[in-house]
Amino acid sequence: MQTYILVLVLSIYLRTSYSAACEGDDCQPQCASYCFGVLNPCMSNLANLQRRTEACEAAVAIARLALNDRRLDTFGSSLTTQPEKKNTSQLLLAPTPEARKLERTDHFQQLGSKYYYIEKENKANWHEALEKCHKMGGYLGSLQNQEELDAFSGKLDGLNRYWIDVTSQFKDDEFVSITKGLKANFLSWAPGEPTKDGQCVDIRTFNGKTTMNDNTCSTNLFFICEKSNEI
């Protein structure tokens, strides 16, 4: 679609260039003004299409996750309706609370009152990070107050940025927690943020302080997953 628009604009420009007489010192300013007038609305349309694409990708990712949850719920319901049959092998395979706790803390570490996994090796865009956290049994970090944000001070590498669950893809200038499906009740922006150059939110630590920044959702960054502390 973008290629088609650019080709169309180029063809219009070439036809006009050959058909219209342009002589003297006024030629270059006239051509530049004309090109800007033609390209400006096209570039605006491309920006709108990009925002719609990102919002669509977010909706698809969320729908896929919701569908997986529904399948798991249905599967669990079908198991509960079956006659209860326990044997020694089933009891041996069933994880104990201690085993479940060990599994949870194998990748997730406790920071404050919550458990987090901080990805520091593989980067992903916001939608990929959302899905990766879900596959780990968690969700993108959902920070609810300054204390939870401060818990990451000293835990993040250098100037690297890390995705969290806040986004404005569904409505401009309205940041929501994708985990809760509600307007984010806690935002702690870095100086000069949000710059409105992106619709997904990351955090980073600079000069000992951890703050939030808006960023383009398609940017590949590290990310933070959160998991319930219930055993």
Image (cartoon, rainbow, N blue to C red):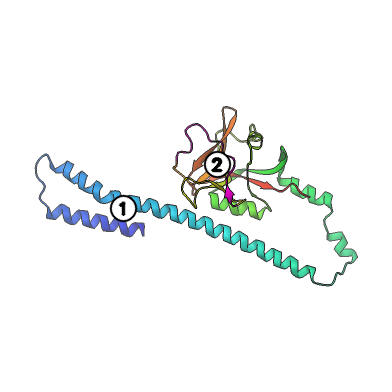
**192 horizontally vs 90: left or right:** left
Q: Name the residue under label 2.
A: 202
Q: Does the magenta stretch include residue 8?
A: no
User: For the residues marked 1 and 2, what is the alpha-carbon distance in whole angstroms?
Assistant: 30 Å
Q: Which residue lies furthest to the top in this view?
A: 207
Tell me how many marks there are: 2
Q: Residue furthest right?
A: 88
Decide whether the magenta segment is chiefly helix, strand or loop: loop
Residue at 40% over, 55% down: 49
Judge whether 50 appears above or below 155 on screen.
below
Residue at 87% over, 69% down: 85
Q: How crowded is mark 2: few (under 14 residues within 10 Å), some or many (20 or more)?
A: many
Circle on res. 42? 1
Q: Which amino acid does label 2 sit on?
A: Asp
Residue 184 position within the rendered picture, expressed as x and y whole percent measured from the top left:
57, 45
Q: Which quarter shows the N terminus?
A: bottom left
Judge whether 137 appears above or below 148 on screen.
below
Q: In which quarter of the image is residue 82?
A: bottom right
Residue 14 position within the rendered picture, expressed as x and y whole percent measured from the top left:
19, 54
**93 horizontally vs 59: left or right:** right
**184 horizontally vs 83: left or right:** left
Q: How crowded is mark 1: few (under 14 residues within 10 Å), some or many (20 or more)?
A: some
Circle on res. 75? none
Residue 65 position within the rendered picture, expressed as x and y whole percent measured from the top left:
61, 59
Residue nearest the observer in this picture, 172 or 72: 172
Disc 1 on helix, strand or loop?
helix
Disc 2 on helix, strand or loop?
strand
Residue at 63% over, 35% down: 146
Q: Is residue 187 magenta?
A: yes
Magenta part of the protein: which range?
A: 181-195
Contact (CB < 8 A) between labels 1 and 2?
no
